[in-house]
């Protein structure tokens, strides 16, 4: 290991910066922020430094560096554009025992400065040992996206908690276990969702230590039970994936595991719901085709209402929320109500069911594009451009079982040839997946004979032919008994 990483406590310590340019400005700002007693030695200052100096943030010696300037210094930074001056600064620092950094001149540095990410007191320092600072910057940026302000706020809570928890739980091992429970809990998620009061209530629940709420006196039970603790909670529109519970995204699963309320559809698997907190409220708003259980307005109102109670709401939707899921309406209802909403995409059945059945939606030489439609619009209120759809290499039809005859008829009427391969993928990605293969000429008859039922995607196009090659054991006969198809998935 070349460098020994430390975090320096500079409060009240003399630090000397030689140079008054743009680079010095950044160093001075950081040193002042860390509480150091800063002296800048430079004939002139940048505008920013001059303003800081007028505000009394540091002392300024308005001349060039002279030997002796580092007397008593704890830390020195050489930030002039003259290497000779910088090297002289380095030599003096070494002789007086001050830590020294010469900007951009690693051989003259006793310490180097990492790339820093700060969230309040939460600090991440990334260093490339000076070999590739750009890499350190990129890694920091990556962490910036991942680690929000909630980390700083968590540390504020932790700072409040530390002493009372040590009193309440004197045993170190037990206390340590509690700290880990706390950092692994939903407290960070609640803070991220802006639910400070709920976060405090959770801290109290986990640690047994009551922290003062914003009001100072409320008990955690009162806080948890109160409606609208501090503004609305967030509604997360989460794509659950096409069926197989393992196909939800990592982000979706993480949110699901933290939610206070989970509002879910018929196509969402029970295995996923088991991932919700045991005390989460699970609300079913599923719609079987034709049988609307809860009207869309009712769902929108429900999401808004629960969020306004300050709850973290996960709206779990089959596939992707924005693919025929009425996700846009739900998101808009939240926005209009002033409720924060985030959409977490999911693997749509468009891609999930087809992939699972061994049908690529594009393939070099066979299909250069694909279109996705709902067959609902193939009814009387039809407004699809069937001429264009008939020319599409691959056509994926959702909600297509009921209106299959109309879809087929329109494609044929618009010039798609009768021998075009078609597949119906029922219960895609699930253990009960079944694939019915046919052509445009006979798919209606075969679907009927096989008793095709929703949920299913209908795929029209040449890539359906790849299925045999991609799923060697796939039942090729569309009336193939279900058990054979099942075996493939159970195996
Ligand atoms: N948002 C969903 C689609 C909702 S519309 C998505 O992105 O997948 C419901 C339709 O999706 C069903 O009628 C069916 O066409 C399709 N679908 C959903 N789950 C499916 C599955 N496991 N297998 C095949 N099709 C499915």
Image: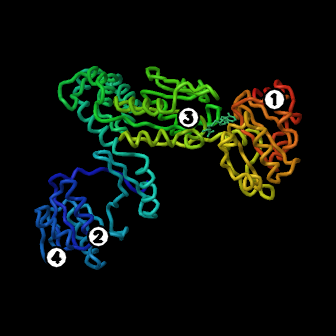
Q: Nearer the viewer, mark 3 or mark 4?
A: 3
Question: In front: 340, or 302?
Answer: 302
Q: Residue at x 42, y 59 (%)?
A: 137
Dot 2: what SS? helix
Mark 3 and mark 1: Cα distance apart in space: 27 Å
Q: Nearer the viewer, mark 4 or mark 1?
A: 1
Q: Position of residue 359 (x, y in %)?
A: 77, 44
Determine whether the beta carbon of the residue marked 1 sits less than 8 angstroms from the nearest atom of ligand 1: no
Q: Position of residue 369 (x, y in %)?
A: 71, 55
Q: Nearer the viewer, mark 3 or mark 1?
A: 3
Mark 3 and mark 4: Cα distance apart in space: 70 Å
Quadrant for ligand 1 reads top right
Q: Residue at x 34, y 35 (%)?
A: 232
Q: Position of residue 117 (x, y in %)?
A: 36, 52
Q: Which badge, 3 or 4, is on the more N-terminal residue?
A: 4
* Quarter of image, res 421: top right
Q: Nearer the viewer, mark 4 or mark 2?
A: 2
- Residue 1 higher or lower than 98, as above or below: above
Label 3, on which residue? 317
401 vs 287, left or right, is right
Mark 4 and mark 1: Cα distance apart in space: 86 Å
Dot 2, how many residues are within 10 Å of its Cα: few (below 14), some (14-19), or many (20+)?
Answer: some
Mark 4 and mark 2: Cα distance apart in space: 20 Å
Determine whether the beta carbon of the residue marked 3 sits less than 8 angstroms from the nearest atom of ligand 1: yes
Label 2, on which residue? 23
Q: Nearer the viewer, mark 2 or mark 3?
A: 3
Q: Which badge, 3 or 1, is on the more N-terminal residue?
A: 3
Q: Residue at x 63, y 41 (%)?
A: 348
Label 4, on which residue? 66
Q: Which badge, 4 or 2, is on the more N-terminal residue?
A: 2
Q: How is the image coloured?
A: rainbow
Label 1, on which residue? 485
């Amino acid at each position: 290991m070349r460098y020994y990483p430390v975090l320096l406590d500079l409060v009240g310590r003399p630090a000397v910066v030689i140079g008054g340019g743009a680079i010095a400005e950044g160093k001075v700002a950081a040193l002042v922020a860390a509480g150091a007693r800063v002296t800048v030695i430079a004939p002139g200052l940048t505008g920013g430094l001059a303003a800081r100096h007028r505000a009394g943030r540091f002392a300024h010696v308005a001349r060039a560096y002279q030997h002796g300037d580092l007397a008593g210094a704890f830390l020195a930074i050489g930030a002039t554009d003259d290497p000779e001056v910088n090297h002289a600064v380095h030599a003096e620092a070494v002789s007086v025992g001050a830590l020294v950094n010469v900007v951009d001149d690693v051989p003259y540095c006793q310490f180097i400065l990492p790339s820093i990410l700060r969230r309040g007191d939460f600090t991440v320092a990334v260093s490339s040992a000076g070999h590739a600072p750009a890499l350190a910057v990129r890694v920091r940026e990556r962490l910036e996206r991942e680690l929000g302000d909630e980390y700083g706020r968590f540390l504020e809570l932790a700072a409040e908690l530390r002493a009372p928890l040590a009193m309440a739980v004197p045993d170190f091992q037990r206390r340590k276990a509690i700290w880990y429970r706390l950092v692994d809990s939903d407290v960070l998620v609640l803070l991220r969702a802006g639910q400070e009061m709920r976060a405090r209530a959770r801290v109290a629940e986990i640690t047994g230590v009551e922290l003062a709420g914003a009001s100072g006196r409320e008990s955690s039970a009162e806080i948890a039970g109160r409606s609208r603790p501090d503004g609305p909670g967030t509604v997360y529109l989460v794509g659950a994936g096409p069926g197989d519970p393992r196909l939800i995204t990592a982000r979706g699963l993480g949110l699901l595991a933290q939610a206070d309320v989970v509002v879910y559809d018929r196509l969402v698997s029970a295995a996923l719901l088991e991932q919700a907190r045991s005390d989460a409220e699970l609300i079913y708003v599923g719609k079987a085709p034709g049988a609307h259980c809860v009207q869309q307005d009712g769902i929108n109102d429900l999401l808004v209402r629960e969020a306004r109670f300050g709850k973290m709401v996960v709206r779990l939707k089959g596939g992707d929320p924005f693919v025929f899921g009425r996700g846009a309406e739900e998101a808009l209802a939240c926005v209009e109500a002033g409720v924060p909403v985030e959409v977490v995409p999911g693997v749509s059945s468009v891609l999930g069911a087809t992939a699972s059945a061994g049908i690529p939606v594009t393939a070099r030489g066979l299909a250069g594009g694909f279109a996705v439609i709902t067959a609902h619009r193939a009814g009387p209120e039809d407004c699809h451009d069937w001429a264009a759809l008939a020319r599409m290499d691959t056509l994926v039809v959702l909600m297509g079982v009921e209106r299959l005859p109309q879809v087929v008829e329109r494609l044929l009427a618009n010039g798609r040839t009768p021998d075009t391969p078609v597949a119906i993928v029922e219960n895609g990605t699930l253990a009960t997946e079944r694939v019915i293969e046919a052509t445009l000429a006979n798919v209606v008859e075969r679907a009927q004979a096989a008793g095709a039922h929703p949920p299913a995607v209908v795929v029209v196009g040449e890539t359906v032919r790849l299925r045999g090659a991609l799923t060697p054991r796939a039942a090729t006969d569309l009336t193939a008994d279900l058990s054979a198809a099942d075996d493939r998935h159970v195996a």
